[in-house]
Amino acid sequence: MHTLLVAAHPDPRSLTHHVLEELEAALHPVSVETADLAKERFDPVFTLADRRAYHEGGNYPADVVSEHRRLERATDLVLVFPVYWWSMPALLKGWIDRVFVNGWAFEYSPASGLRPKLQALTTHLLPIAGDDSGSYERHGYEEALRTQIEHGIVDYCGSRRGATAFIHESEQASSEATARNVDRAVRIISDTIHARSRTRS
């Protein structure tokens, strides 16, 4: 078992980074690697070279190949991110755009159709939301986000769906309430990964 935590937030003092640290500690003794996309200055811009690689199904840019190697070592992937405009930040979306590409995450051709390739990976989501859970339910925000990411990305590439644990009301004045929300979400994700680890051993 090896877990890759991927975070997208520019401020190292952010709640996102705090959650990342709490999750890494909770996952012990499972092997964990962290990809801090902002700190690593990952370029999220999908370039002409990326487009050519996408259509050819190979000859990927060097930084994309490095991300492929990280993901190939992982049994579990956890995306830890603040919710921006009811979705993920552009940095994380750009990472997915460039890394989860044709020929690696899936293969598609008009003749043979779609062949997902990430069946060995289980993907978990830890979105950090400013609004309360009631607003997410009333307006369908959670369902929309889950459809976009779980179905549109995770299922499309053949990855197994792991746990999804929202942290709501992340900007409330009560630090105690925020801490409880963080503890609950971290426990959901870490318990799921630990359970998988026990069944594989």
Image: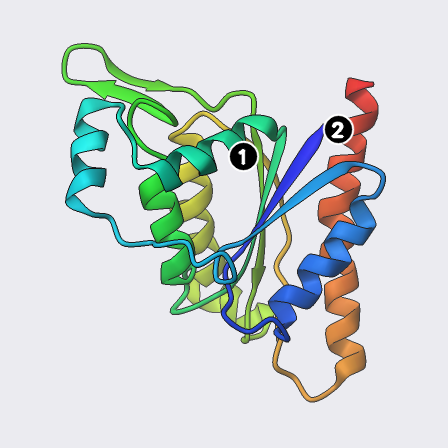
Expressed as whole percent of the image width and height from the top left, the position of residue 64 reads: 37, 38
* Mark linked to residue 136: none
Residues packed near mark 2 inside 10 Å, few (<14), some (14 to 19) or many (20 plus): some
Displayed quadrant of residue 154: top left
Amino acid at dot 1? Arg
Cβ atoms under marks 1 and 2 closer than 8 Å: no
Identify the residue at horizontal 38%, vertical 41% (top origin).
63
Q: Is residue 149 left or right of residue 186?
A: left
Q: How far is the residue under mark 1 from the one under mark 2?
A: 20 Å
Residue at disc 1, secondary structure: helix
Q: Position of residue 28 (x, y in %)?
A: 83, 43
Badge 1: few (under 14), some or many (20 or more) residues near its Cα, within 10 Å? Answer: some
Q: Is residue 145 above or below residue 76?
A: below
Residue name at image x 43 percent, y 59 percent: 41
**Along the line of sight, which residue is nearer the eye, 28 or 161?**
28
Picture layout, residue 139 above or below residue 48: below
Residue closest to the far bottom: 173
The residue wearing badge 2 is 196
Quadrant of the frame with the N terminus: top right
Label 1 or label 2, whichever comes before in sequence order: 1
Give the residue at x 80% y 21%: 199
> Does dot 2 land on a helix, a strand or a loop?
helix
The quarter of the picture where the C terminus appears is: top right
> What residue would you read off at disc 1?
70
The picture places residue 99, in percent across and down from the top left corner, at: 37, 38
Amino acid carrying label 2: it is: Arg
State which quadrant residue 105 falls in.
top left
